[in-house]
Image: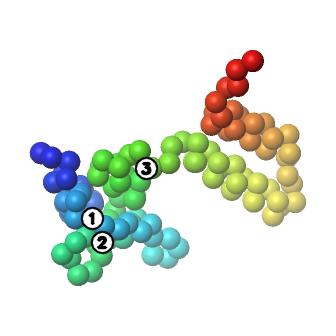
Amino acid sequence: MASSTRMVALGFGTFARADRIYALERLTGDERGDRRRTRVWVEGVADPLIASRTEVTILRDMGQGAVVAGPELDEALDLAARLAAAAEEGRVDLSDLGRRARRLLASTTPASED
């Protein structure tokens, strides 16, 4: 089967052709919950479908894995969340945050040649 006609599982027995999906929107707040992760717009379908799978998983199944951020983004977001929470509590551990930031930067920066 050609990649343009690849079927993508949206969850719970719902599928869409990869070449017909033209937009994905992550559900947030009260919209997101049990079996509700992503709004999916499919060509030829009037209203968006609600998928139980995340937009990242859907993109990977569509063959768009290269456009999906890797674990470095997850680590950066985790670092930002930790910093925000610590700042709200008035307890920022700069040595821990500095260590995590250096490790993250080292994993995304090519080693310099001497």
Numbered tag placed on residue 67 in the rendering: 3
Q: Give me the C-alpha separation between circle 3 and circle 2.
A: 18 Å
As drawn, is 82 to the left or to the right of 32?
Answer: right
Evaluate if marks 2 and 1 touch, with contact meaning CB atoms under 8 Å apart: yes
Numbered tag placed on residue 79 in the rendering: none
User: Can you see residue 83?
Assistant: yes
Secondary structure state at the residue bearing disc 1:
strand
Image coords of residue 50 (percent x, y): 32, 71
Q: How packed is label 3: few (under 14 Cα within 10 Å), some, or many (20 or more)?
A: few
Residue drawn at x 23%, y 81% is: 46
Evaluate if marks 3 and 2 touch, with contact meaning CB atoms under 8 Å apart: no
Query: Which residue is farthest top?
Result: 114
Q: Give me the C-alpha separation between circle 2 and circle 1.
A: 6 Å
Q: Earlier in the sequence, mark 1 or mark 3?
A: 1
As drawn, is 38 to the left or to the right of 111?
Answer: left
Image coords of residue 27 (percent x, y): 45, 70
Residue topped by disc 1: 21
Evaluate if marks 1 and 3 touch, with contact meaning CB atoms under 8 Å apart: no
Pick the residue in front: 24 or 54.
Answer: 24
Front: mark 3 or 2: 3
Numbered tag placed on residue 41 in the rendering: 2
Image coords of residue 18 (percent x, y): 23, 57
Q: Amino acid at mark 3?
A: Val
How many numbered discs, if any?
3
61 shown above or below 95 = below
Q: Quadrant of residue 36?
A: bottom left
